[in-house]
Image (cartoon, rainbow, N blue to C red):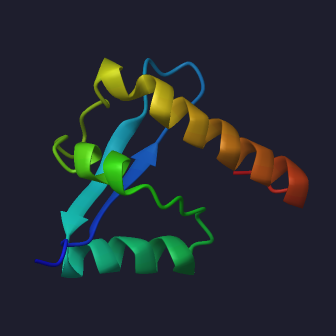
Amino acid sequence: MKDIKKAAALKYEENSIAPIVTASGMGHIADKIIEKAEENDVPIVYNKELSDLLSNVDVGEYIPPDLYEAVAHIIAYVADLDRKIGGDR
């Protein structure tokens, strides 16, 4: 059986207690989330295990503490990309 594609979008603001899930979906909705990210030059990180876990978090909710470390690595990676390209997100 083929896995269904899942995607989640996160928003993190400095001084926030944790990132917030701003979009989440499977299949066609996941495709749309990825498409919107690409259209808006939002970095995309492919991590099946993390997207599976984030798809269980309600939109508008903070990520659960057990995902902090994994998401922190992604935020650091994206921040590093921003520095390298001189971006200001």
Q: Measuring from the top left, give residue 79's x and y in whole percent.
A: 72, 43
Q: Measuring from the top left, give residue 68's x and y in whole percent.
A: 43, 25
- Say if residue 61 shows up in the picture: yes
User: The N terminus is located in which quarter?
Assistant: bottom left
Q: Is residue 52 left or right of residue 16?
A: left
Q: Which residue is at a point 21% across and 51% down the rendered structure image?
A: 55
Q: Which residue is at a point 67% across and 48% down the rendered structure image?
A: 78
Does residue 4 lie above or below 49 as drawn?
Answer: below
Q: Is residue 74 left or right of residue 8?
A: right
Question: Toward the viewer: 42 or 53?
Answer: 53
Q: Measuring from the top left, give residue 56's x and y in whole percent.
A: 16, 44
Does residue 50 lie above or below 30 as drawn?
Answer: above
- Say if residue 86 shows up in the picture: no
Q: Which residue is at a point 21% across and 64% down the rendered structure image?
A: 25
Q: Is residue 8 left or right of residue 86?
A: left
Quarter occupied by residue 17: top left
Q: Is residue 83 left or right of residue 9?
A: right
Quarter occupied by residue 31: bottom left
Q: Measuring from the top left, give residue 19's x and y in whole percent.
A: 43, 33
